[in-house]
Amino acid sequence: MAEFADALNDCQLLDLGADGAIFSWARGEIFERLDRALIGEGWPDLLSTSRVTNLPRILSDHISLLIQCQIPGPPIRPPFRFQSMWVRHHSFLKEVEECWKEDTGEKGMVNLQLKLGRLKRSLKSWNKNIFGNIFEKVKQAEEEAQEALKRFELLRTPACRVEMNRTATELTLKL
């Protein structure tokens, strides 16, 4: 560890710290903070804020680090994202077909652009009605898994271990 600390000093790297679980690695009853996000001195000039979150441990003895950075300037509108789960829903093709067959009154590429724009709006609305806000559901499952992991790290009881595993499984299903 002394050599690692010297290397950090020599390279002028700083540990960003992290929210969430205290320990980033576990094997049996041994817990350690091994995983870290390191930055150089120019980092704050490029990105106005940075936040590191230790996510719940799933399928590994290491946790994942979520590093969120904010670029200075106006917020960027999130792009449209096609969700692969949509095609498995029984009403998806009907939604696409109804939206697509509606006439735009245009021809060629303008027709295609108008239909794609209309389909995008339609699928966003359909997704919200059918699946709800999946990102909010994932965020809630992450928070529950985080809390269960923190309780287990503090108490280390069999009941806390069961709850930690249950919430990690639910998070995996939501993801």
Image (cartoon, grey):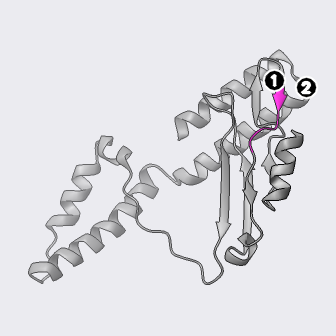
Q: What stretch is highlighted in magenta?
A: 31-35
**Which residue is painted at 12% across and 83% down in the image?**
105
**Quadrant of the rendering where the N terminus is positioned:** top right
The picture quadrant where one finds residue 46 is: bottom right
Instruction: Kindly state the secondary structure of the residue where label 2 is placed.
Output: helix
Horizontal side, residue 134 vs residue 169: left or right: left
Which class describes the residues within 10 Å of circle 1: few (<14), some (14-19), or many (20+)?
some
Residues at badges 1 and 2 in contact (C-beta under 8 Å)?
yes
Q: Give the vertical position of 64 relative to 136 (above or below).
A: above
Residue 165 coordinates in the image, percent (x, y): 69, 25
Residue 15 showing in the rendered view? no
- How many numbered callouts? 2
Q: Give the vertical position of 3 relative to 38 (above or below).
A: above
Residue 114 coordinates in the image, percent (x, y): 23, 78
Residue beneath disc 2: 155
- Which one is in front, 33 or 75? 33
Mark closer to the chain start, 1 or 2: 2
Horizontal side, residue 167 vs residue 173: left or right: right
- Which one is in front, 70 or 139? 70
**Which residue is painted at 14% across and 66% down in the image?**
101
- The secondary structure making up most of the magenta span is loop
Q: What residue type is labelled 1?
A: Cys
Q: Which amino acid does label 2 sit on?
A: Leu
Which class describes the residues within 10 Å of circle 2: few (<14), some (14-19), or many (20+)?
few
Residue 25 coordinates in the image, percent (x, y): 75, 32
Disc ID at residue 160: 1
The picture quadrant where one finds residue 24 is: top right
